[in-house]
Each structure stands twice: as structure tokens, then as C-alpha cells.
Amino acid sequence: MPAQALSAEQLRLQFVTLVDPVERPSLFQLFEKTNNEICRRLQYTCTLRFFPPARAAAMVESGEADGENYRIFNFATDGQNPRHLRIDAPLFPASFVAWGKPGSARVNSWDELAAQGQPVIHLFGSKTVTSKLSAKMGSNLLPTHSVESGLNMVLADRAGYFITSDSRGVEQKISQMRLEGQLARLGMVDTVDTYMYLNDKHRAIAPRFKRTIEDMKKDGTLEMLMIEAGEIKARQK
């Protein structure tokens, strides 16, 4: 039966995300609320679960999951994820911020970061970071599985910088670990748009997702959800 012919009762979509709700609770909740609102408007039922990046991508490729959040524009263009169908309406920007010890050199681009000649820690599975830095840094680009681990590696002088797109999550973790004053933001190196992807078996309903996301952007819903999650500040009236 074509996807568009399925009733709301029949169409239940399982989304996955690489964002760990324990490590990055506010960002996970932002994605969950966003998905729920999209599906509410479309009269679908959606759920969201966390899996590590490679596993999440594999689940969408196999059809075990229906889609995933928080992937960059060209995620599928290298041919490794051919069944990932991008919904061509940006959801949220991802700003990549470098963190390190106070007094370390500030950096404002990928090139400046690589030029420091110090090891850089990033979260495992970050395709943007590896595509920007792996050729320039080689073995000095080190993956880790958690924000806490990345921060501890910087504190132990095993790396000069920790880079991630979840600044809010890092700030919360620094507070939880009582590391204020020991670690600081050292610059924003890039900002990219992120997108929702569906398994290509849902090609027929992809335009509906696109229109709904565009509507949510126009009516202010996406901005409101980001404000609630602490990702941006409310505009001054």
C-alpha cells in the first residue's frame, strides 16, 4: 500500500538520533519535541531513540528505523548512505565550538584549529569534524564517546582542544563537573545547517515533511522550541 494511503493509525514512524539523552538532554528533548510536533501536524505517530552514530545510520539504511535527526546537508553524497533521503528544509543550525583551557589560543576557523599543532578531541561519529580536519591533522584528531571524556582529556593535557556542535551540553557538563574556570570557549569555527533524513521507502511522504517543517519555521514554532531548549535566546522586543 502506498505510504500516502496509510491512515494515521497505521503510520507509526521510528526515528533515531546520534544525540545521547544522558550526555546531551536538552538537545535530545529539542529533537523529540520537534519530531512530535511535525508528526502531530501530519497526523502520524513518531518515537525517537538514541543510538551511536554508525548504528543509527545503519538502522535507517536497512529500514529498521524510518529516519534520523541532526545530519548535515551532504551526509549521503559520498555514497555510503544511499537510502538516506534528505528532507530539504533545514531544521536547526549546528555551531562547532572549540573548548580548551583558559589562555590557550583562540580559533575562528577549521584552518586555525588545525594550525595550532595540538591534538583535537571530537565526539565519535562527527562526520563534519572528520571531513574538515582528518586530512590536515591525521593522528592528532582523536575521537571520544562522551563530552565528559573529551573535557577530561583536555584537562589531562592529552589534547589542546575539544570540539563539538553542542555548546549548551558542554556548558551543562562543565557545571556538573564543577570545572568552571578550568575550561573555556575558545572560538566558533563553523556553523552548518542540519536536516532530517528519511529512509527512501518514505519518498512519497517526504514532500509533506518538507512543507510542515517550512510551516513551523514560518509560524515561529522552530524558534520557540530552540528557545525552550536553551539553544538560543528570545529576541528582545
Image (tube, rainbow, N blue to C red):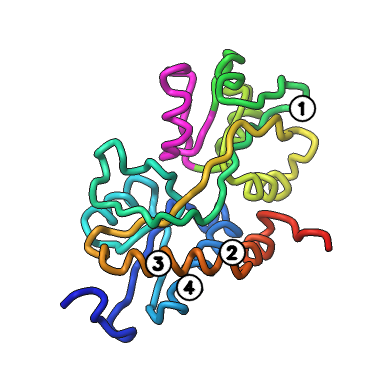
**For the residues bearing labels 4 and 3, Cβ distance under 8 angstroms:** no
Q: CA distance from mark 2 to mark 4?
A: 12 Å
Q: Which residue is mark 1?
A: 102
Q: Is residue 34 toward the left or the right of residue 134 in the image?
A: right
| Position in image of residue 120 (x %, y %) | 55, 25
Q: Mark 2 and mark 4 in contact? Answer it, CB < 8 Å.
A: no
Amino acid bearing label 3? Phe
Q: Is residue 143 magenta?
A: yes
Residue 168 in the image, given as x and y percentages of width and height? 66, 49
The first of marks 2 and 4 along the sequence is 4
Is 35 displayed left or right of 234 in the figure?
Answer: left
Task: Tell me which numbered mark, 4 or 3, is placed earlier along the sequence.
Answer: 4
Q: Residues within 10 Å of mark 4 (few under 14, many from 20)?
A: some
Viewer-nearest of labels 4 and 1?
Answer: 4
Number of other residues with Cα within 10 Å of mark 2, as a class: few under 14, some 14 to 19, many 20 or more: many
Q: Which residues are magenta?
A: 121-145
User: For the residues carrying marks 4 and 3, which lies nearer the camera in this image?
Assistant: 3
- Of labels 3 and 1, earlier in sequence is 1
Q: CA distance from mark 4 to mark 3?
A: 12 Å
Q: Which residue is mark 3?
A: 209
Amino acid type shown at disc 1: Pro
The furthest residue to the left:
1
Q: Secondary structure at mark 1?
A: loop
- Quadrant location of the N terminus in the rendered image: bottom left
x and y percentages locating residue 62 in the rendered image: 21, 56
Q: Mark 2 falls on what kind of element?
A: helix
Taking 31 as reference, is 134 above or below it? above
Tag on residue 222? 2
**What residue would you read off at disc 4?**
36
